[in-house]
């Protein structure tokens, strides 16, 4: 495929840069490898052949010309190309191969446990299968199987994966009986010999060697599996695998283990990537370990600490940062650099070649060729919002013909909220010393972990030097934190300098004589942990989850106080870890089991004399002397009995999912019929967003606590705790609180209660199902609250309760279920961010009083109170919130209900802004109210005339980047998004409170573009006005309005409805709204969002030094209102906060709305010189002689039929109109506000009362 087509596809479809490179460099008919992340794990897109599956993560094969169709499939969240994986050798000169001679630090085991009945596997390069340390006493192999991925596929020996050669135990034994076993298998380990033998031989011996030569590994009694990684990439030399084949290697281990517990050592990696655990290969690892107990992956941290491959820093608004990238003249390989920054920000990325004078600049969402002397020598991609973490991503590929020298990568802050960036150079296959690198002056030794070493569940291992007194951390050992600031990576440190282990035979050798060699690197540290895990499996004598393994290793580790690695768990203490695990089983279960070499027992078998199950633990009494209980003890045990029943039902096969347990609970509660496909993560999202799902189950479940917040009520037995793991897709967990007691760490220790962690805080006993069940008879505690009484991040608490109030059949207003109290959503999958807010002393806040003109008491919702003055304009005695756009569709009763609904929204948004301050600062509601300078005129009637002001912006959504043809086309078309029902389906992506629909003729020419800013609340209200007596009339009116807007009588009420979980509601995403743009449908485009932004922006904030915050981007980042990448939200927030900083009180104009005011046609030309302004027609709303005061909610731009030309023949600035987005860039929008005079509490122009809230 040509470069222009490839670049166009990247820009249009926002492809993974490596995938775009594949499109460019591989013939269209060629089969390539990739990894998919799916929304529904059961729906595979056409043309994608699945090879391995890890729930929603799949590896597979597809033709290059199908990449775009697969990526655009509605069920595909992410599609990634295979990325290379290899070994970064730290040092290769420590020792020459010598038989049985020990120099350096030996590894070894004195434990009675050696991993019997378990599997130790390694995915690596080069295995000397004939080395004595991998043989049984009778000379047969300890290998269950050995997969050489790089071997030619032989149809006579087929395998599930369709490539490579898998050798069985029997084939390996047969080869060992010959004079040349390597020739017999047609595999010699010297293919991976770097001078000191093959890497895989050394690492597997450290983990599980039998000690016949040198010292034994901790997994010396385990059976073995080895996968020699490879990649199909042509022209690659040396040891190299890739992310696809590594996942398939893990799948092979899991299949081959056949239920036996296994641990995989991964002493491989790469440096480029997101470094936050969200890469698809890391998500695949996470999903695999969550399949059930007995699955552990151990990963080396990397040897990159001093390699000058990492840079991190800040780039402020309007500033730039230069990164000097040095390419060695002897480097003949391709080179790659990877940069990541917040999705809130917008950078321009530029690159300049050595001795160059100009930069190639690439805006967000674009791609550019890098040309040297007329030849394309590279490409720079700048991707918007990676679908797995929503961050922006720039990637540079330099090809082998690129000139050596100092390249400069420039990051320019175009629109910056966060400003934080990270960049990594991908290690290449250049010979030693020729690796490209950053200038050492700008590099960081932090954030140097390998790319696949940041998964939350993978155990990442760094290296220390046991040759030196004090065992310091090795200078090469990569450091954390991860890019998302998890500071406990690497979790463990193990010996990694001068470690003696098996050496493979050199080239030409026929037999292995027991060679050893000393090598260094985190590659040598990780297998110490892998071997320990195998011994822990045997010591436990029962299924052990990854969580238990991690917790035991953490508790047993030797701390590294005073070290720069002090946030990690510490040095591996093998003996203590095994001892702790062994203590969890009864004495009679600890006998060492002697098994014949060929036996393959499984500790998951229902009955076996070799691995007796530990007896059930008995219930224990709770110690109550630690202080006052924070939980309620009045809840009956009935639901706990139901939870136990759900546990037994859902866990009958020991592999049941978290979802199964949750659905059993919901069935008991009567909720399942409303949410039959609900997952823990789905219920978590619904709870924090207070979405329609929570409204459907309102009478059965209520939210008790949100992430990082204090509970609204005391916790009690029967409450549901939901957790998600960020960055891992739909991975969630559910527990039922089994007791009314909160327990501290001291109680847990004294009562010998197992807990999920050793963190300070308050714990509770739980019942939970899924892969790792706990019943009331097996006491297990999870951390419910921190020391300040707040729920941990990524956790919510729900409470089941019975009964719901009957519907009110009177004509009084009752807030309908669609009337959600939620803030404006930023992106398709982003969840609510909850900030922790702190403040300085608020003692002087008691001096604050509301201004005199705003001293009227609270009004009734249904009948506004009388004003205190003769002032009789919009805030007079008969004040009512009018319908948006001053529309006249409603009669008196509907207008009254509309007023009450809008007042309800005002109250809830002001309450939300108040509660954010109350909860974050820890003050009373009364004190928190003093910080919110926003009011509802239906609650407080002004006694003076307020000043009018407008907040303007344009309708085109700038957050998508520069309006290139690809972006204009993208914005014009529906894109898959999550709607308010939790469904993923096509919706208009236009999110500046204005949406449009393009109508074309048969020649694809634009004939008409319809614009709307009419809020969805208007139509939701007509479907359910909150007054049952008005419902039928309102719904008839709803259908009538649709028929008028769409020009057809064929529309029925059923066309406008959707049924989700048995509940029928109005559907903003109905086909008529999709096709005719009746009203706003983007989930962020609501009246509620507008009011929410205004209320929360009316809070004055300062930094820690007391300086007022005036930068709107900082304000948005502080309080998380709106999206800083839009035009509208920052404009509203900035104008509102300016008024608040002057100590003015403000509200919104009546009628409340976000309005179009006019179409700016300056510079437009038509074929017949007609004024393009005459083609703009207002269809709905109120106009004014002053266009700046227009309240337009529906309009169209169309050329009259008699003109003989179309909209596409009109030019804007000389460019023909091809997209509605071009017109949208000239549609003016506004929000109307009203404010009072400057008030007291100012001293020298600075706010002194109340004290500003510290961000």
Image (cartoon, rainbow, N blue to C red):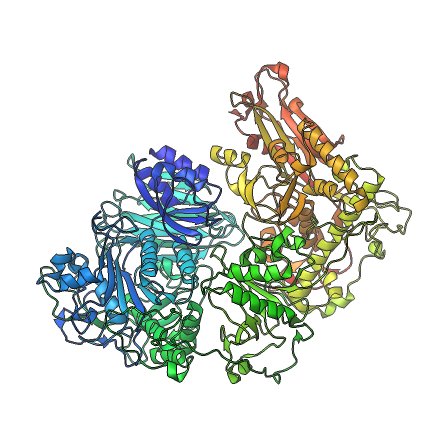
Give percent across and percent down for residue 480: 40, 65
Q: Residue 325: horizontal and vertical position, in percent?
A: 33, 51
Of residue 378 and residue 790, the one placed in the foreground of this image is: 790
Q: Can residue 1218 be seen in this view?
A: yes
Front position in the image: 952 or 85: 85
The quarter holding residue 907 reads bottom right
Which residue does the image show at 83% across and 37% down from the upper left?
Answer: 891
Name above or below for residue 888 compared with residue 563: above
Percent x, y for residue 231? 27, 50
| Left or right placement of residue 882 versus residue 630 in this view | right
Q: Position of residue 301 (x, y in %)?
A: 35, 64
Up/down of 1008 relative to 332, above or below: above
Question: Does 764 sit above or below residue 246?
Answer: below
Residue drawn at point x = 19 percent, y = 62 percent: 170
Identify the residue at image location x=41%, y=35%: 8
Look at the image and tell me in which quarter the C terminus lies: bottom right
Quarter of the image for residue 1205 reads top right
Q: Residue at x 63, y 57 (%)?
A: 671
- The front one of 940 and 605 is 605
Q: Is residue 443 visible?
A: no
Please name whichever residue, 231 or 370, is drawn nearer the observer in this view of the structure.
Answer: 231
């Amino acid at each position: 495929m040509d470069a222009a087509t490839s670049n166009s596809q990247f820009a249009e479809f926002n492809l993974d840069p490596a995938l775009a490179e594949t499109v460019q460099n591989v013939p269209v008919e060629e089969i390539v490898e990739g990894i998919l992340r799916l929304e529904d794990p059961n729906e595979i897109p056409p043309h994608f052949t699945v090879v391995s599956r890890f729930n929603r993560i799949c590896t597979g094969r597809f033709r290059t010309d199908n990449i775009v169709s697969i990526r655009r499939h509605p069920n595909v969240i992410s599609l990634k190309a295979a990325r290379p994986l290899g070994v970064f050798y730290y040092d290769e000169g420590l020792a020459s191969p010598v038989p049985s001679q020990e120099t350096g630090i030996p590894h070894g085991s004195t434990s009675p446990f050696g991993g019997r009945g378990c599997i130790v596997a390694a995915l690596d390069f080069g295995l000397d299968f004939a080395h004595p340390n991998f043989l049984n006493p009778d000379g047969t192999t300890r290998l269950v199987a050995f997969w050489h991925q790089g071997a030619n596929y032989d149809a006579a020996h087929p395998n599930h994966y369709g490539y490579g050669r898998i050798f069985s135990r029997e084939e390996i034994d047969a080869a060992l009986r010959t004079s040349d076993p390597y020739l017999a298998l047609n595999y010699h380990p010297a293919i991976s010999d770097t001078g000191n033998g093959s890497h895989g031989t050394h690492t597997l011996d450290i983990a599980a060697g039998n000690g016949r030569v040198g010292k034994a590994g901790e997994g010396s009694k385990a059976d073995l599996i080895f996968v020699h990684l490879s990649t199909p990439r042509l022209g690659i030399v040396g040891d190299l695998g890739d992310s696809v084949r590594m996942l398939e290697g893990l799948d092979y281990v899991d299949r081959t283990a056949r239920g036996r517990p296994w641990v995989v050592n991964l002493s491989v990696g790469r440096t480029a990537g997101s470094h936050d655990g969200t890469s698809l290969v890391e998500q695949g690892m996470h999903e695999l370990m969550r399949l059930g107990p007995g699955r552990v992956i151990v990963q080396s941290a990397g040897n990159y600490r001093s390699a000058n491959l990492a840079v991190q820093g800040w780039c402020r608004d309007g500033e730039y940062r230069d990164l000097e990238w040095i390419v060695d003249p002897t480097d003949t390989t391709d080179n790659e650099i990877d940069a990541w920054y917040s999705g809130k920000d917008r950078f321009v990325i530029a690159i300049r070649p050595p001795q160059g004078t100009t930069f190639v600049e690439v805006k967000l969402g674009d791609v550019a060729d890098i040309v040297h002397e007329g030849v394309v020598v590279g490409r720079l991609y700048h991707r918007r919002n990676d679908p797995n973490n929503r961050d922006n991503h720039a990637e540079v590929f330099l090809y082998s013909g690129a000139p050596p020298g100092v390249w400069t990568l420039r990051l320019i802050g175009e629109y910056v909220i966060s400003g934080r960036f990270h960049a990594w150079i991908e290690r290449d296959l250049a010979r030693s010393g020729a690796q490209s690198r950053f200038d050492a002056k700008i590099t960081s030794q932090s954030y140097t972990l390998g790319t696949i070493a940041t998964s939350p569940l993978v155990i990442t291992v760094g290296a220390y030097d046991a040759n030196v007194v004090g065992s310091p951390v090795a200078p090469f050992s990569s450091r954390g934190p991860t890019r998302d600031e998890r500071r406990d990576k690497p979790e463990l440190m193990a010996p990694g300098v001068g470690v003696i282990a098996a050496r493979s035979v050199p080239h030409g050798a026929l037999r292995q004589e027991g060679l050893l060699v000393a090598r260094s690197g985190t590659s040598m540290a990780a297998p110490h942990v892998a071997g320990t895990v195998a011994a822990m499996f045997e010591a436990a004598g029962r299924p052990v989850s990854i969580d238990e393994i991690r917790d035991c290793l953490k508790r047993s580790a030797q701390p590294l106080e005073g070290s720069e690695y002090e946030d990690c768990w510490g040095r591996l203490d093998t003996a203590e870890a095994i001892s702790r695990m062994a203590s969890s089983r009864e004495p009679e279960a600890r006998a060492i089991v002697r098994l014949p070499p060929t036996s393959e027992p499984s500790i998951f078998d229902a009955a076996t004399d070799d691995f007796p199950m530990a007896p059930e633990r008995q219930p224990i009494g709770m110690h109550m002397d630690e202080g006052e209980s924070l939980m309620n003890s009045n809840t009956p045990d009935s639901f706990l009995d139901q939870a136990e029943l759900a546990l037994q039902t859902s866990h009958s096969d020991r592999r049941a999912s978290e979802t199964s347990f949750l659905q059993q609970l919901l069935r008991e509660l009567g909720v399942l019929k409303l949410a039959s496909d609900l997952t823990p993560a789905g219920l978590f999202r619904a709870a924090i967003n207070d979405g329609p799902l929570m409204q459907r189950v309102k009478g059965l479940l209520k939210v008790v606590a949100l992430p990082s917040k204090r509970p609204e009520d005391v916790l009690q037995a029967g409450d549901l705790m939901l957790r998600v793991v960020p960055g891992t897709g739909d991975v969630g967990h559910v527990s039922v609180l089994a007791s009314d007691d909160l327990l501290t760490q001291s109680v847990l220790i004294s009562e010998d209660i197992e807990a999920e962690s050793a963190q300070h805080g308050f714990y509770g006993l739980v019942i939970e199902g899924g892969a790792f069940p706990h019943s009331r008879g097996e006491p297990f505690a999870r951390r419910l609250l921190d020391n300040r009484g707040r729920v941990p991040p990524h956790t919510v608490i729900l409470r089941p309760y019975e009964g719901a109030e009957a519907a009110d059949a009177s004509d009084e207003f009752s807030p309908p279920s669609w009337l959600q109290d939620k803030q404006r959503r930023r992106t398709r999958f982003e969840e609510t961010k909850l900030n922790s807010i702190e403040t300085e002393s608020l003692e002087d806040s008691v001096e604050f009083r509301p201004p005199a003109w705003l001293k009227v008491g609270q009004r009734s919702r249904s009948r506004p109170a009388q004003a205190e003055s003769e002032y009789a304009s919009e805030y007079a005695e008969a004040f009512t919130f009018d319908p948006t756009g001053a529309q006249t569709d409603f009669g008196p009763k509907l207008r009254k209900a509309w007023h009450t609904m809008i007042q309800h929204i005002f109250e809830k948004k002001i309450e939300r802004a108040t509660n954010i301050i109350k909860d974050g600062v820890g003050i009373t509601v009364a004190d928190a109210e003093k910080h919110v300078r926003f009011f509802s005129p239906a609650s407080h009637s002004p006694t003076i005339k307020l000043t009018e002001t407008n907040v303007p912006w344009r309708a085109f959504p700038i957050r998508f980047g520069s309006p290139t043809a690809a972006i204009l086309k993208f914005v014009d078309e529906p894109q898959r998004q999550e709607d308010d029902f939790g469904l993923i389906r096509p919706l208009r992506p236009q999110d500046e409170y204005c949406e449009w629909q393009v109508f074309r003729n048969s020649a694809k020419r634009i004939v008409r573009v319809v614009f709307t800013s009419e809020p969805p609340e208007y139509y939701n209200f007509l479907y359910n006005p909150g007054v049952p007596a008005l419902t039928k009339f309102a719904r008839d009116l709803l259908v009538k309005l649709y028929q008028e807007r769409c020009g057809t009588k064929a529309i029925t009420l059923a066309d406008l409805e959707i049924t989700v979980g048995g509940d029928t509601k109005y559907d903003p995403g109905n086909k008529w709204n999709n096709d005719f743009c009746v009203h706003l449908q983007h989930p962020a485009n609501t009246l509620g969002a507008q009011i929410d932004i205004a209320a929360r922006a009316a809070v004055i904030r300062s930094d820690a030094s007391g300086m007022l915050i005036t930068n709107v981007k900082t304000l948005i980042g502080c309080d998380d209102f709106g999206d800083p990448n839009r035009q509208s939200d920052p404009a509203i927030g900035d104008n509102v906060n300016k008024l608040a900083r002057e100590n003015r009180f403000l509200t919104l104009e009546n009628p409340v709305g976000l309005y179009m005011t006019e179409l700016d046609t300056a510079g437009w030309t038509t074929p017949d010189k007609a004024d393009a302004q005459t083609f703009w027609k207002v269809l709905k709303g109120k106009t004014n002689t002053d266009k700046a005061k227009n309240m337009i909610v529906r309009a169209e731009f169309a050329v009259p039929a008699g003109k003989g030309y179309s909209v596409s023949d009109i030019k804007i600035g000389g460019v023909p109109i091809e997209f509605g987005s071009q017109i949208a860039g000239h549609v003016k929008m506004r929000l109307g506000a009203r404010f009072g005079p400057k008030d007291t509490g100012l001293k020298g122009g600075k706010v002194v009362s109340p004290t500003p809230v510290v961000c």
